[in-house]
């Protein structure tokens, strides 16, 4: 039996508990962090199946943080919740249903990639 997928959710928005509840309800194990600085020490290689960063009012900082994570570990699945979802390859809308769909797609794609790498 597969263990639950682990998601690091960096999010200090007032509605973050709604996202945590929705992700947990889908069977994901969610590790919340309020600040990017707090999460930086928790971002170990292979520690999470997905890292989700809520940009909020700190779009520039969030984008730089995501770019840094991507450069350090290109295979790390990464999404950034942003109102300007077209900014980069890992940006996604804050709309909960769109976010959940994108998370499911991302994790499913990585699962297929992992299986291909193992073959």
Image (cartoon, rainbow, N blue to C red):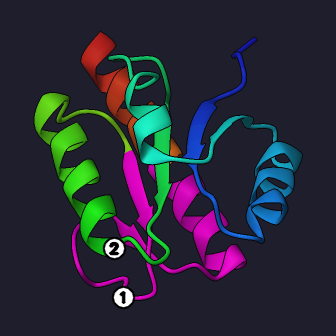
Q: Is residue 119 visible in this depiction of the protein?
A: no
Q: Is residue 48 visible in this depiction of the protein?
A: yes
Picture quadrant where residue 7 is located: top right
Q: Do the residues labelled 2 and 1 touch (CB within 8 Å)?
A: yes
Nearer to us of marks 2 and 1 is 2
Please state, as top left, top right, bottom left or bottom right, where the C terminus lies in the image: top left
Residue 21 on image: x %, y %: 86, 53
Between 105 and 35, the residue placed more toward the observer is 35
* Residue at 74% in and 62% down: 16
Q: Mark 2 points at which residue?
A: 59
Q: Specify few, some or many for label 1: CA neighbours under 10 Å numbering under 14, 14-19, or 20 or more.
A: few
* Residue at 41% in and 39% down: 37
Q: In this view, does 18 lie above or below 119?
A: below
Q: In terms of secondary structure, where does tag 2 sit?
A: helix
Which region of the structure is painted magenta?
Answer: 78-106
Numbered disc total: 2
Precedes in sequence: disc 2 or disc 1: 2
Residue 51 on image: x %, y %: 46, 42
Residue 89 on image: x %, y %: 23, 67
């Amino acid at each position: 039996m597969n263990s639950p997928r682990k998601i690091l959710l960096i999010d200090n928005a007032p509605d973050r508990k709604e996202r945590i509840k929705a992700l947990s309800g889908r069977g994901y194990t969610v590790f919340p962090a309020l600040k990017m600085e707090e999460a930086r020490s928790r971002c170990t290689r292979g520690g999470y199946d997905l890292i989700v960063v809520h940009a909020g009012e700190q779009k520039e900082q969030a984008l730089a943080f995501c770019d840094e994570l991507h450069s350090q570990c290109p295979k790390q699945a990464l999404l950034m919740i942003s109102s300007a979802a077209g900014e980069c390859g890992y940006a996604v809308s804050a709309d909960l249903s769109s976010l959940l769909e994108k998370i499911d797609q991302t994790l499913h794609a990585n699962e297929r990639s992992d299986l291909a790498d193992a073959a």
